Amino acid sequence: MMDARNDTCGMAAGPPEKKPARTRAKKRRSGKPRRGYTTGACAQAAARAAAMTVATGYVPCESGGEDGHRRDVELIGSVEVTLPNGEATLFTVTMHAEGVCSVVKDAGDDPDITHGLQIFVCVTPRFDGRFTLDGAEGVGRVTLEGLPVRPGRAAINPVPYKHILNEVRKVLTRGADITVSIPGGEELAGRTFNPRLGIVGGLSVLGTTGRVEPWSQEAYQKSLIPQLDVARAAGVKRPVLVPGAKGERAAVKAGMARETIVHAGNFIGMMLEAAGERGYGSVTILGHTAKVAKLARGDFDTHSRRSSMPLDVLADCAREIGWSDRRAAALESLPTTEAAIRRIIKAGEAAVLDLAAARVAAAVKERYGIRARVMLTDSRGDIVGKA
């Protein structure tokens, strides 16, 4: 629900109208992906526009030669803001009522689930010099320690928080209450890391630069590391690193507490380094043998484009426990790691998988100085090897 302090603010709570993103951006150069804008940048622009409608009663039109014009019951205009990275950018805005404006998020060519959402900001004037900023419909609320935002507050990260406030302060010097809402955000939040981070009820307002880089691996990596901060703040002594959802289900099946489980994706090395930086001297690594056994050969980025199936690891471990070269080599000719697991188990030679787990633990200790309890699983999530 929108903030009930002002009926005008409630107008922003209606369902977002489907329309193309209006944020101004340069056309894509040939073969070059187009950059987009963060949720924080869109909220910053909407905040400036909403404040200006309070001050003047009209939708702002800050682009040269442009005038606001009526379209049905909405007014379309534009504002120019300076993004956190110093880039001056013109955004198209929609005025829904005095003090209520929105910007449609344009994520460029990044596969961002928030692309096309309307980011609403409601600004209600005060006269005591105070400025407040909160979230409403579709904006998550933090419930756990360890994040840049304190528990109980709206999930608006520090950089966008600062820039949203500054835009309103420039226009309304005597104070204002500011509310950000993202209709549809609560439903989409279930497809993000927010539930794992203890952010409930909606999306986060993010953006340290204001820009979204297309197909950004860095953005995904940054979304993983805060899980360690949340775990540490919750008193977790040994985090359980898993590649993904299947690993999480296997960890729960093995009796691991959910609050200890941390998704690492393919970036196990990055997460181990981050764990060490946060003072963790030991971790558990649990996941399918096809992913986790790759670490034994020093492949700490386990993406298939950079690291092949660990059939060679399993074959070498088989030789070490006494398999003939011919028999061990046959493992390497199998189509999948799962097929190799089945053959090893059928032969009653689970020691091969235990040795692979031990080699993973040794590689982690050598590279990162962290003690690792390693558990290898099969496709059903059963533990087939450990060390």
Image (cartoon, rainbow, N blue to C red):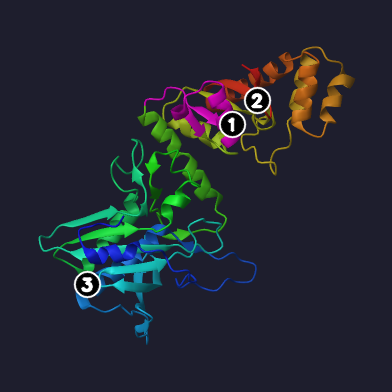
Gap in Å between the C-alphas at discs 3 and 2?
A: 59 Å
| 224 to the left or right of 87 | right
Q: Which residue is mark 3?
A: 54
Residue at 29%, 56% (x, y): give it. 162
Q: Quadrant of the N terminus?
A: bottom left
Q: Amino acid at mark 1?
A: Gly
Residue at 64%, 71% (x, y): give it. 30
Give the structural element (helix, strand or loop) at label 1: helix
Q: Is residue 271 above or below residue 61?
A: above
Give the structural element (helix, strand or loop) at label 2: strand
Q: Which residue is mark 2?
A: 377
Other residues around mark 3 within 10 Å, as few (<14) / some (14–19) / many (≥20): many
Gap in Å between the C-alphas at discs 1 and 2?
A: 8 Å
> Looking at the picture, how far across and down is residue 46, in whole percent?
34, 67
Q: Is residue 63 above or below residue 230?
A: below
> Looking at the picture, how far across and down is residue 350, in whole percent?
72, 15
Residue at 55%, 66% (x, y): give it. 34
Q: Earlier in the sequence, mark 1 or mark 2?
A: 1
Q: Which residue is mark 1?
A: 247
Q: Which residues are magenta?
A: 235-262
Residue at 55%, 31% (x, y): give it. 248
The answer to whether residue 327 shows anywhere in this view is yes
* Front residue of 11 and 287: 11
Gap in Å between the C-alphas at discs 1 and 3?
A: 51 Å
